[in-house]
Amino acid sequence: MTAEQIIFYIATGFILVSALMVVTTRNLIHAALWLVATLFGVAVVYATLDASFLAVVQVVVYIGAIAIMFVFAVMLTKRNLLDHVPQTNANWPWAAGIAALVGAGLLYTASQLTTFGAQRPALSGDSLMNLGKALVSPDAFVLPFEAASILLLAALVGAVYLVNKR
Amino acid sequence: MATETLIWLLPLPPLLAFFLIVLFTNKSKTLSHSLAIGAALLSFLGSMLVFARALATPEFGREVFASSINWIPTGDTFLKIGVLIDPLSAIVLFFVAITVLMIFIYSVGYHNYGQPAGDHDRAGLQPHGATVTDESGHKRMVLSVEPMYSRFFAFIGLFAFGMYTLVVSDSLLTLFVGWEIMGLCSYLLIGFWYGKPSARAAAIKAFMTTRVGDVFMLLGIAFLYSATGTLTYREIFTQQTLQALASTPTGIFGLSAAGLIALLLFIGTVGKSAQWPLHIWLPDAMEGPTPVSAMIHAATMVSAGVYTVIRMFPLLTADFTGHGLTATMSVIAFIGTFTAIFAATIALAQRDIKKVLAYSTISQLGFMLAAIGMGAYIAAVFHLVTHAFFKALLFLGSGSVIHGMEHGVFHTGNHHLDPQDMFNMGGLKNKMPITFWTFLIGGFSLAGFPLLTAGFWSKDEILADAFAHGHWAILITLAIAALMTAFYTMRQITLTFLGEPRTKEAEHAQETPWTMTLPLAALAVFAVGFGWLGIPEHFPGLGGLLPNWIHEFVGGTLAERPEVLAFSWIPLLTSLVVALGGLLLGWAVYKNVEAGQPDPLEKPLGFLYPFLQNKWYFDEFYQYFVVQPVIWFSEVFSSQWLDKLVIDGALHFIGRSALAIGDVFRNKFDKPVINEFIGDGTATVFQKAGHELRLLQTGRIQNYMISAVALMIVLGAILIYVLA
Amino acid sequence: MVPLSAYLFLSAVLFSLGLYGALARKNAIAILLGVELMLNAVNINLVSFWRYGETAQMAGQVFAVIVFAVAAAEVAVGLALIINIYRRRNNINADEIDLMKW
């Protein structure tokens, strides 16, 4: 096993265990912290995929902002946190069944890939530079990029409006 | 700033002004017009700078200002959006910038800025005047400010944006975008006083009629795109593409692909430039405020139509060998020539000062298209530019006259008098001197007053081209049309300004404010001076004093510079005779018209006069042969016969038989079996089921989500394993 | 060398875990946590397909960046909604937010 494989499998195990904890643990604060762990694992996976920028963004944006926002939200609604009662609703067996079905379908589909993706092609050019160019070049993705920024602004305004005490 | 960047920015200020006025400043009249005029001024300055740089570029034409970026992805290629300034668009940009700015300034005065609000003015109707009390306590009526003042400036801002877009664009796609923006704006502006039913009808008529042309134009664009894969001028006008297009037969009337595309695009122009047979909308468009008329008829929309054909000149002449016109060129030349004389005859018998100008515009555009059809590229461009100047001048001047007459109307209080009827005017020369002199200059330029005016040089050039290439029929027809032009122009000037006032209102007419006269003066300069830039080199006496700049400059647009025509006395004498003869004749016939006297032409022309006055009965023709049949078809055929007789009959039959069958069933089957057994039975079952099933509607989001995902799994499985 | 399918397996399992969380958890915030897991699974897919496909084409990474933006927007609005609901009903059990029933 190469070092890369070792890192990948460790990260995979880490991700799956912490994701399982996210969806099963009773204490919501813990769940949010497990989410942070999962996101770290995913950042490592990005790194193994040579997507260095995304790995950093994953840490900075996802963990630094989104996950922390979850923690805040949990604390703001803490009076309601009763972690001694079951944290799942009455339909959880159905949900588990359906999730298992979806997972099985996805796994099966992924296992059908035999030739494509067996070998990893060499990187062409500086992918960080390419990504930057792709995001702001009118030949590529400047329009979706701008649309995303407008979406963020709209979400910001909407969120402020929603929680504004009237 | 780099010239290309500047060109990109040219259309934007008016658009910005439009949005700012609509969104923010529509409450303030001062802010709104300052914004609009400021925007027009910015675009004007930018255009002049671009034009100056174009002049300073040696070999401009081979060297052009162009830049483009990707716009809309189409699969693996992009539709490009770009700007291009070559000699042709540079010169069009020049006159568009000037006329647009002048029209903007003029609108301030025309809509009575600074006057009090009207007594009972309503949005959507012309201002009716306001009562003011002066120091001594006298009440009098004065003009009142337009109630929708800001809205007007917003619209003309958008209009200017459309025109600038059209001029600077480097492809038919963006040209068409600008074209349609202008179509929309002309609809909005013609129907500006939407409270008047006639204005509403005119707006719809203009929109529908130009739409007919636009559909064909779009077809042409689509055909061009499918044939060449590009809409950019410079990619279409390569030798290779043009030859490929010219040698592709289409099987329609034996036209080549180039010819058919050019013909389709030309039909768009016929609608936009109001050529026969789609000319009917333009005279009705006079329902709009006068600056709109000037904008639509001189500076922008109709010029845009001609500009497009001129732009497509290489395509038009792709299969032109120099001997005998191609089918497409003949069609264009024929329609142009016919329209030129046809509209000129109608203009002879109109009484409304603006309608005369409207028909004269149609006629002059016919001149340009006739020139294009003959392959006289430069003459067409030249006439397009000079016409834009003097016709904008004339329209604005006529607006000024009407304004002055309205003063008189308020003075006398006789609101039944039509302030646009030339037979109610007369003697305005002394009341409105600036308007008179500028109108005279514009009118003489339109008539082609020899040597001095711009109209003479450009019209002479068209006639010279017709002569040099031996198109005798066109030459003679256009000469007669030019004679009529001079005649009705002088008729208009004489009736309006000369002689004695024929009504009290004309006696009390007043000069208009400086915001209206300043644009007149500015345009008058160009209506005279611009012609001197295009004096043929071999012209006796004057030729060579000034270089023939138009020929040098505009000729550079084409791959091969057109050769300089040899000088000949015949077309020159023709233009001299028709211009001077027409002017003299017009003055002689109309100088002594008394109040209440009928048109002196009425007698000698006999039955022709009402025929001309009613515009060859074209509106009636369309009414009887297009509109009425459609209505008849829908009323009589569809409604009476098909609907009432056939369909209703069938339905009644079905209904009756169904009734009979129903009766039987009801008594034999329904009552005993259904009602008692199934009817009440199922109702109970459904009631029960509903009662049970409503529990499924838990209102809990996760339950719904489970069902949704489950369904998705099932559908996905079907898609993958059954269909694939 | 890790093949592409390994990454796809990881993302498949992560996705179904997230789906389970979103469908089964009572607490509204926990539902959003599940959604975050699903989004991350999608992102892994996008990036790994980029890496194993034509790496000069940046569509995969760009889409991942846009998913980030969408996730941030979704969390911001979602949490705002939850806090608003909490203020009104003093409760964020998705089970009991059932005003829409029958």
Image (cartoon, coloured by chain):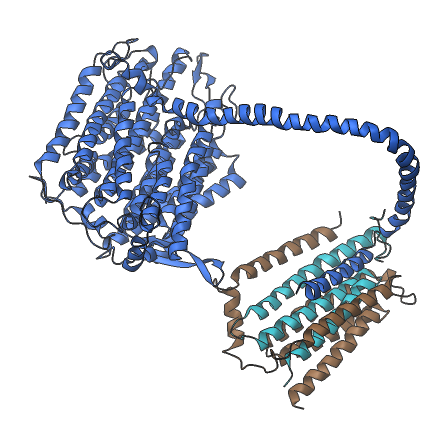
Chain colours: A brown, B blue, C cyan
Q: Is residue C82 above or below residue B670?
A: below
Residue shown at 51% from the left, 26% from the top: B633
Question: Residue A39, percent across and down?
Answer: 71, 73
* Residue extending furthest toward the bottom: A1
Q: Is residue B367 above or below residue C39?
A: above
Question: Residue C101, percent across and down?
Answer: 85, 48
Q: Nearer the viewer, residue B147 or B376?
A: B376
Q: Is residue C50 visible?
A: yes
Question: Residue A25, percent across and down?
Answer: 84, 71
Q: Quadrant of residue B688?
A: top right
Q: Nearer the viewer, residue B98 or B601?
A: B601
Residue shown at 66% from the left, 28% from the top: B650
Q: Is residue B511 above or below residue C101?
A: above
Q: Is residue A82 left or right of residue B95?
A: right
Q: Is residue B453 visible?
A: no
Q: Is residue A2 left or right of residue A145?
A: right
